Image (spheres, coloured by chain):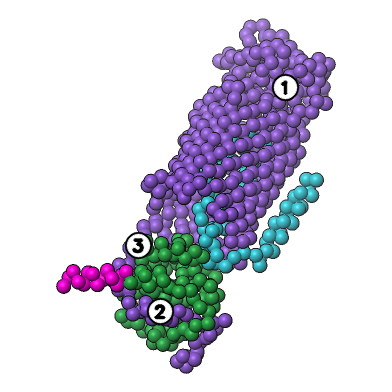
């Protein structure tokens, strides 16, 4: 306990007024030499811009989706911890995605979503939807500032546009610190209003795939559909120790509106053979060769997620691990385990291996295929993204500081999805073929951060 | 004459740097010497090299020292870095015109009940605590300065 | 099973809010102040991954907000 100095000159001191400055001898030396000669430092130009840019290549095997993306995040800092962040992403997409139909031992012909012509899938292959994806542009703008000493507010807007999809959203987050800023409680809200304008219009769910139409023939379809999504997040971040930070978030998401994929279908198969059921071609023109129905999902979905993340520092290395559990009213349950380990190599470079495990159960209306003559269910989808599958991502990132003091990094990751198809769900010849379009993708990203 | 004075200034600057560099560990039971501060307005400012607002406050503290040292303002910067070398390299890059102490044991920080970084305590000429500021806001600089002037003029 | 896990999670959550005695002194946040210890070390990488997995899986998001860091001001 440092001696209170009241004695020195008979001064009375309140508890908080103790001026227990020790090292008197050294202090005397400092005083003696004085400090007048040192030039005081100029105000550091804190307010300024910093930029985060990246180039991404995402490519799936088997002629599936390929994406080249340019992303930028520009941030303007204003005095006293206020920020304006502006994000811009431009994606150039090509390739195709499985349309939900199953591979067969014979060729299959489907009508393209535009309704103008058809495409044929060779035997043994997963039919992939001939995609017209071209460009997608997404923008975000966020403003962040403290409110008083202990609160922080972040508000923002987001928007994206591609040829058949428009998204508009607003978001807001409020956080408050407790316990000398060891605990931070945050609440967030986001609302999105999306509009779909699919090529060829919106097909009626659970109706048969249509034939090729003439230009002036009415499609009998709606032109556009919309969906709304509300997200709520409640989170607690807690400093556990000098080198350990823990965060736990609970999220709730509610989607309503048109939630189906207008381009996805479900194959109808023979109840005994398991083969797709052939249908007669239209008299004048082209159409699908086998029986398929457009998918139909419920018009609402509510999800609950629990997410926990820890960051742990061990003499220069940082372990970042998170776990997320998700459950929804479509009966999908998922578990995600994500781990990164940052390993400094020198004071300017680091290596960061990354491992992610994911597993999900199928939606209760997910079907590999429908059976001929069974009564049509209320909802059905064969979209592989609603199936029971496991996925693993393994990657490595290498980062370095440039001569100019800016940060660059490259990362290469492999993402692999494998379906968990229960053999009890397979009928007849389906056992001879794949029922889930396993996916292999490569992620390559180069990032460059520069600015103040 | 000018060469001599510039050499002298360099030597003083060097001495100050050495002085800061060879600051001994704060002994918990040394009797502080308040005598030298009696009748002066003292700002005790707790900072650390990794604290960005602390870095922002330095130029302001330097300018306060320049403006009011003659009127009796004493600024004492107390560094709370865990790793002393970090503080030393910070001071080499951003020199302070006021004196700096290293509170290695963090006794001083506990004595002053530091709950935020930076924390600044304004003590009047009578040694009483007048104001306590947690954090440093550039927009409040005028407010902070007004408090110093009031303390120097011994105004309530 | 599902509701059990959610309940467990909320319990952890509530427990964490009660961790008012846990933490460090304001001057012990040097490591937490490092850029590599922030929750948003690489916002673009995080947004990229979120978008990829949102497009290819049935789950999305979960992560969030602020906290940690130097705790300054």
Q: Chain of mark 3?
A: A
Q: Chain of mark 1?
A: A
Residue, disc 3: A43
Same-subunit check for callouts 2 and 1: yes
Query: Which residue is depicted at the point 49% across and 49% down?
Result: A142
Residue B8 counted in the magenta span: yes
Pointer 2 with pointer 3, Cβ within 8 A: no
Q: Is residue B89 above or below residue A311?
A: below
Pointer 2 with pointer 1, Cβ within 8 A: no
Residue, disc 1: A434
Left-right relation of A31 to A250: left
Which of the two discs, 2 and 3, labels the residue nearer the N terminus? 2
Furthest-top residue in this view = A283
Magenta-tinted stretch? B1-14
Q: Chain of mark 2?
A: A
Q: Determine the colour of chain B.
A: green
* Dominant secondary structure, magenta: helix
Left-right relation of A121 to C34: right
């Amino acid at each position: 306990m440092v001696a209170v100095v009241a004695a020195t000159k008979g001064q009375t001191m309140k508890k908080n007024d103790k001026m227990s400055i020790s090292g008197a001898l050294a202090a005397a030396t400092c005083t003696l030499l004085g400090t007048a000669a040192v030039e005081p430092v100029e105000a550091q130009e804190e307010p300024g811009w910093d930029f985060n840019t990246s180039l991404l290549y995402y490519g799936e095997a088997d002629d599936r989706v390929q994406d080249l993306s340019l992303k930028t995040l520009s941030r303007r800092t204003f005095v006293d911890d206020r920020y304006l962040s502006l994000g811009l992403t431009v994606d150039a997409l090509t390739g195709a995605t499985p349309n939900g139909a199953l591979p067969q031992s014979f060729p299959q012909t489907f009508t393209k979503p535009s309704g103008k012509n058809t495409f044929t899938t060779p035997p043994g292959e997963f039919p992939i939807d001939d995609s017209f994806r071209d460009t997608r542009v997404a923008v975000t703008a966020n403003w962040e500032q403290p409110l008083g000493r202990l609160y922080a507010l972040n508000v923002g807007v987001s928007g994206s546009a591609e040829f058949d999809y428009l998204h508009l959203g607003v978001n807001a987050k409020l956080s408050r610190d407790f316990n000398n800023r060891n605990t931070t409680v945050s609440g967030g809200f986001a609302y999105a209003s999306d509009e779909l304008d699919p090529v060829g219009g919106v097909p009626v769910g659970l109706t048969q795939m249509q034939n090729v139409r003439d230009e002036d023939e009415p499609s009998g379809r709606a032109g556009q559909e919309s969906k709304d999504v509300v997200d709520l997040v409640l989170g607690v971040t807690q400093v556990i120790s000098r080198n350990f930070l823990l965060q736990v978030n609970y999220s709730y998401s509610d989607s309503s509106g048109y939630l189906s994929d207008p381009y996805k279908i479900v194959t109808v198969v023979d109840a005994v053979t398991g083969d797709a059921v052939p249908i007669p071609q239209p008299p004048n023109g082209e159409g699908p060769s086998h029986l398929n129905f457009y998918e139909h999902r419920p018009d609402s979905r509510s999800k609950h997620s629990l997410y926990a993340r820890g960051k742990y520092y061990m003499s220069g290395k940082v372990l970042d691990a998170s776990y997320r559990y998700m459950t929804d009213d479509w009966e999908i349950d998922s578990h995600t385990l994500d781990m990164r380990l940052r390993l400094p190599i020198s004071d300017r470079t680091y290596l960061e291996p990354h491992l992610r495990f994911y597993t999900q159960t199928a939606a209760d209306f997910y079907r590999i295929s429908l059976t001929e003559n069974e009564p049509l269910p209320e909802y059905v989808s064969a979209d592989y993204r609603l199936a029971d599958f496991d996925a693993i991502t393994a990657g490595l990132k290498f980062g370095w500081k440039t001569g100019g003091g800016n940060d660059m990094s490259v990362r290469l990751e492999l993402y692999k999805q494998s379906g968990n198809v229960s053999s009890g769900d397979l009928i007849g010849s389906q056992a001879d073929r794949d029922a889930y379009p396993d996916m292999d993708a490569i992620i390559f990203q180069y990032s460059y951060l520069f600015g103040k | 004459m000018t060469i001599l004075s510039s050499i002298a200034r360099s030597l003083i600057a060097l001495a100050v740097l050495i002085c800061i560099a060879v600051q001994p560990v704060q002994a918990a039971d040394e009797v502080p010497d308040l005598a030298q501060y009696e009748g002066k307005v003292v700002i005790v400012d707790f900072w650390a090299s990794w604290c960005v607002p602390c870095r922002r406050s330095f130029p302001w503290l330097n300018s306060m020292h320049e403006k009011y040292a003659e009127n009796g303002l004493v600024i004492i910067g107390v560094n709370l870095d865990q790793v002393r070398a970090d503080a030393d390299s910070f001071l080499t890059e951003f020199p302070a015109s006021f004196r700096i102490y290293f509170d290695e044991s963090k006794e001083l920080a506990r004595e002053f009940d530091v709950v935020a970084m930076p924390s600044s305590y304004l003590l009047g000429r009578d040694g009483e605590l007048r104001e306590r500021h947690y954090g440093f806001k550039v927009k409040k600089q005028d407010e902070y300065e007004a408090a110093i002037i009031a303390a120097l003029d011994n105004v309530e | 099973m599902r509701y059990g896990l959610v309940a467990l999670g909320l319990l952890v959550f509530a427990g964490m809010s009660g961790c008012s005695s846990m933490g460090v002194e304001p001057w012990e946040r040097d490591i937490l102040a490092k850029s590599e210890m922030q929750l948003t070390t690489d916002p673009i990488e995080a947004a990229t991954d979120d978008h990829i997995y949102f497009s290819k899986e049935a789950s999305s998001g979960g992560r969030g907000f602020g906290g940690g860091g130097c705790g300054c001001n």
